[in-house]
Amino acid sequence: MRDVYVLGIGQTIFGKHPDKTVSDLGAAAVLAAVKDAEISPKEFQAAYCGTMFSPPTPVQSILIRLGVDRIPMYTVENACASGSSAVHLLYKDIALGACEVGVALGVESLSAYNRKFGKGLLAIEGDLQGQIGLTMPAYFAKLCNRLMQERGATLEDICYPSVKNHKAGMTNPYSQYKKELTFADIMASPMIVDPITLLQCSPQSDGAAAVILCTEEYFRKHNKKSNRSPVKISGSVISVSGAEDASYDPLALRSLIEGAKAVCEMAGVDAEKDINLVELHDAFSGEELAAYEMLGLCKPGEGVAFARSGAAQLGGRCPVNPSGGLLSMGHPLGASGVRVVADVTRQLWGEAGPNQVQEAKVGMAQMLGGVLTNIESAVVAGVHILVK
Amino acid sequence: MSQKLFYPGALDEKDGKLMQMGNKCKNCEKTSFPAVELCPFCSSEDLEKVPLSIEGTVFSFSITRVPVGPFKPPIIGAYIDLPEGTRVFGQIHADEEQVNTGMKVRVRTGVLWTEKDGTEVLGYYYVPVGVQCGGIK
């Protein structure tokens, strides 16, 4: 396996872009990434695009706008881990010797999706549980209820990630929201699924993100940002759940726990000691609270104590979602998995401005998604470790 | 009046009543619902169509306060654990104060909603054990 480096990152501002197509958004993000990397897009030898609800062949429609043609291109869907999957597949191509440099991007326009299908809670079409009312917030509400029953979490604990992440989003130039929230604000917003209120949910967003990955040799030859410490992807794992029976506890989602363990082993890091920051899938505030222990940032059962100690906030032992996370950044579904890899890279380069985690050397980028019948939900996790 | 199942194959008529039908695997002994091509646990094709237990225990539930598809709030959705070790998702028709984690529920079958063209969509839901009301309101 060859080492894989990040040569450039780019993204659009996340938010409402109703006048922009998926192609507009994707082209803007990839253009930003090639400007950042200071290479020609003609250099790309492979391209992967993560998305859930785009029109067919988004990757070709995006890349031809930059003159990129005649290379293998793929669009991948893997729920909220679609973008993670795009990064993972490009990582593998480079690590295994199939190409030297390529682009992984993610894009989504929920505005376009809503125009087509109408607004509402997302349930999976044709799935048994989806047919009778199981939606994403309904699943995560059960997770919150488990946190309260089994881990002693209070409503303040459940809302804490939303308070923390909205604060961080205030100073992120790419975030959808620039509004600080209190626990009282969050609980006063409309109830969606008890105990999840509107402001515990990530918003509907439009946006795109891109990362350019390459070999060490390519990096040495083409990297013009000599002030940047080289950042490499030291671990990349896509982990899928198993069949579900009554023994399953959503607080101990095996695919996430084993995926996080595997990626740390691959990178040779100890999650509890070595990771300096995490960007993760906080589609719902309580989901982040449940993730701390499953990712190994603390011992099993100690996620609430980890949060209460301030470990997850900027200045804490391991800041989680210093970007503002999905809750404040926004969540253009397919883009988020790429965006978290870009944001961890930005942190390791020391270019995160007021959101900078001091002395960050090792970061984790995680996504989780999909709720289905017959299989433990969430059904797919994508986890990356980046090291400076 | 025309009728259809909310999910083909999830229910079957047995002794004049609609029952939830799963697959019992003769290789690993797991019962899965709904029945799919092979055992989701071990890929065995040595499967037997069986009715699911009619009573189960609420593992976890949530109350949705906004409409979802044809359902009007409050929508009480729950994971129900059955004695055979299967976890089933279903709605509980009851007053929300009656619903608790760990409570026993019993399955009922009937019309879940009526489509615009008048087609009745049949499915299952749960009611608290010992409560006689709790039909569709």
Image: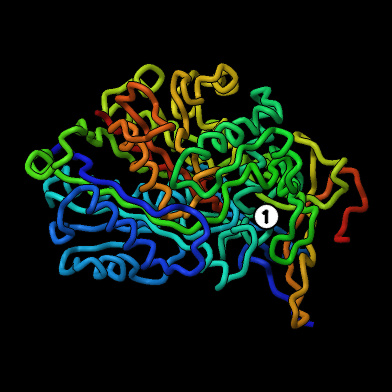
Q: Where is mark 1, residue-wise?
A: B51
Q: Residue A65: image x %, image y %?
A: 26, 69
Work out whether residue B114 or residue A334 is closer to the camera in this orientation and state it.
Answer: A334
Q: Residue B9: image x %, image y %?
A: 61, 65
* Residue B86 appears in view: no
Quadrant position of residue A208:
bottom left
Tell me the residue at 60%/22% (across/down). A304
Work out whether residue A382 or residue A241 is closer to the camera in this orientation and state it.
Answer: A382
Position of A73 relative to A217 (above/below): below
Question: Residue under mark 1: which chain is it in?
Answer: B
Quarter occupied by the C terminus of chain B: bottom right
Q: Residue A12: image x %, image y %?
A: 39, 54
Tell me the residue at 79%/39% (across/down). B104
Q: Residue B108: image x %, image y %?
A: 80, 56
Q: Would residue B22 appear left or right of A359 to someone viewing this image?
A: right
Quadrant position of residue A344:
top left
Q: Would residue A333 appear left or right of A148 to someone viewing this image?
A: left
Quarter occupied by the N terminus of chain B: bottom right
- Hey, what amino acid is under mark 1? Pro
Work out whether residue B122 or residue A358 is closer to the camera in this orientation and state it.
Answer: A358
* Residue A322 appears in view: yes
Tell me the residue at 20%/30% (across/down). A229
Q: Would residue A76 appear left or right of B87 to someone viewing this image?
A: left
Quadrant position of residue B86:
top right
